[in-house]
Each structure stands twice: as C-alpha cells, then as structure tokens.
Amino acid sequence: MTRNFLAIGECMVEMAPTGEGTYRLGFAGDTLNTAWYARRMLPEAWDVSYLTGVGRDSVSEEMLAFFEDAGIGTDLIQRFDDRTVGLYIIQLNDGERSFSYWRSDSAARQLARDRTRLDAALAASDVIYFSGITLAILPTEHRGGFLEAVKAARKRGATIAFDPNLRLRLWESVESMCASVMEAAAVSDIVLPSFEDEATFFGDVGPVDTANRYSEAGVPLVIVKNGPGEVLWQADGVPWTFQVPPVPEVVDTTAAGDSFNAAFLASHLQGADLEVSIAAGARLAAQVIGRRGALVEQPEAV
Ligand code: ADP
C-alpha cells in the first residue's frame, strides 16, 4: 500500500555565484530540501510530494520540472496567475556568503489561502512535514487556519513532523515567532529543533531545556540537533543522547538540519529504533556538510 509523505513550504530560485558576475540558477528551500532527501531515503512504496504555490511563468514551470525530475509529486501545488516564485542571490565577499531575498510577495505565501484545497491535500497524506519558515511566510490571517488543518489531519491519523527553523527576519517580532512555533509544536508528533536557534530566541540554557519545553507543550517526540554536539532526544519525556560522528572537513553546513530530518524521518517512519534513525540522520547530514550546496547528489547509503 502506498504511503504519502507531504512537505509544505516555500522553494525559491537560488542564484549562486560562479565567478565574474555570473550566477547559476538553482532551486532550494528548507522544506524542499527535506522532501528532496526524503525521496532518496524512502522506498518506492512511499510517495513524496510538495505543497507550495507557484506562478504560471516559465521559471515556475522550470521549478515544477525540477521537482518532477527529483521524483517529488507536484499534484498538490497551487498555481497563481498574478504571482511568481521567490528568489535569492548569494554573494561572496572575501569568502563570506551573504544573501539577498525577493520573496515578500511570492506565490508560496498563498498556499493556505484556499482552506478547502488545503484540507483535501492534507487528507491525502500519511505524514505531513513543515517548518517555522512555512508558518512565517503565511500572512498572519492564514496561520490559524493552516494549523487547524494540520490538527484535523493529525486527528484523522496523520503523523505531523515540524522543524521550528527560527528565522527572525521573516517574522513580525520575536514574540509572534515564538508563540506561533509553540502553537505548531502543540499539534505535532515530532519536533526537530536546532539548539543554537532555540537558545537564541527562547533563552534555553542547554538542549535539555529545549526538549523539556516542547515535551511540556505536549510533543511526544523531540529531537534536539546541536551542530557537531550530541543530539538529545526525548520520547514521552525521557531524555537520551547520541554522539554525532565527526566530519573530517566541514565544507558547507547548508541543509545540515534539513537532510538530518529527512533521513531520520525516513528511517523512523519505516519502523526503525529511534537511535538507529537518529544515526541515519547524522550520517546523511555529515555527507551533506562535507560537500558544497544544499542538495548533494547520490549520497552514499546511510
Ligand atoms: P541546522 O542546519 O538546522 O542548524 P544543526 O547545525 O544543528 O542544524 O545540524 C544538524 C545536524 O547536522 C547535527 O545534528 C549533526 O548531525 C550534523 N552536523 C551539523 N554540523 C556538524 C559538524 N560540524 N560536525 C558534524 N556533524 C554536524
């Protein structure tokens, strides 16, 4: 029987420098990265789809073709006549990367506008994955309806996985970000925060504080990532740790957390032990950060 993994969020056009004022066009976004790796990690019996909004212009078409080529289903993606996809440019200044974004009016921001459509999409999914960035890009008046739809899907039996991915510049304020993230956590089965972000905005002193805060909000399984530090996970309130393998050379940490989440979920959803699944997450993340770019082709078996 086919099972459906649905990631929800925004994928953007990425312009990455290739030297001499030229740029390579690619596609990236936190939830898309996770869908991309999940497609590689899950067996054929799983469908992996993406829910976002795109336009009807040629770059939107190109993005859809990119999803299809990666084996990611596009049936649930909404097309908007009057909008297109967001874009960012990476610039290199003395080896330091800086990012400029054009995403404030992107089609993805409207993904929860049509509640009936959203409900139907979620109803067809066994696993629903989204992030704090997914929430942040929604107009404030769509956020409540989005979380209600997720809650209804969970009630019906879907598994909900959420990465808080705290990005303050996308939010109105620290308070609204933290409040929305805790609301999303409260409707999730699995929350996958990164300690550094959580410490910055919630004031957690150690990963155990992060895990406790989400556990107390009712999250059954919390997995706290911490860069090269140990992963702390808490299942039904009981904490455990996993030492991540050292990475010989950290080349580019882009998508470390996104790829970790994909490999973890792929393993966990197929019934593996939590420790085995966390090890799979850490192994994939180690491969991804050892190479340049968010989407690393043909990662070794993890
Ligand atoms: P995010 O990308 O969300 O900030 P983290 O930095 O916490 O996520 O990293 C996610 C996972 O990637 C970690 O749990 C770990 O497995 C792996 N990882 C990240 N940085 C390193 C590193 N320097 N060495 C080894 N593993 C790392």
Image (spheres, rainbow, N blue to C red):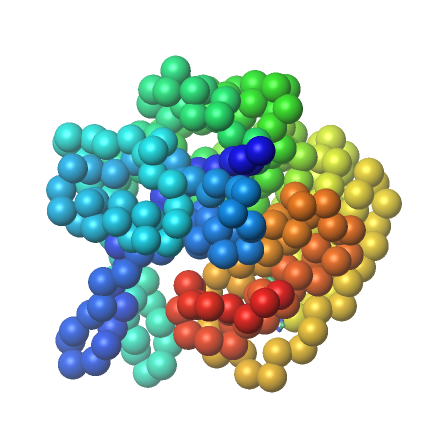
Q: Residue 164 is drawn in which quadrant?
A: top right
Q: Nearer the viewer, residue 188 or 64?
A: 64
Q: Nearer the viewer, residue 167 or 35?
A: 35
Q: Nearer the viewer, residue 78 or 110?
A: 78
The reply, left or right, for residue 153 in relation to residue 15 is: right
Q: What quarter of the picture does the N terminus occupy?
A: top right
Q: Image height check: is 53 above or below 167? A: above
Q: Percent position (x, y) of residue 19?
A: 21, 80
Residue at image point 20% right, 37% down:
55
Q: Residue 92 is drawn in which quadrant?
A: bottom left
Q: Percent position (x, y) of residue 28?
A: 35, 55
Residue at image point 70% right, 69% down:
244
Q: Nearer the viewer, residue 228 or 74?
A: 74
Q: Is residue 239 visible?
A: yes
Q: Image height check: is 176 above or below 131? A: above
Q: What quarter of the picture does the C terminus occupy?
A: bottom right
Q: Is residue 178 visible?
A: no
Q: Percent position (x, y) of residue 144?
A: 48, 22
Quarter of the picture for ligand 1? bottom right
Residue at image point 82% right, 38% down:
236
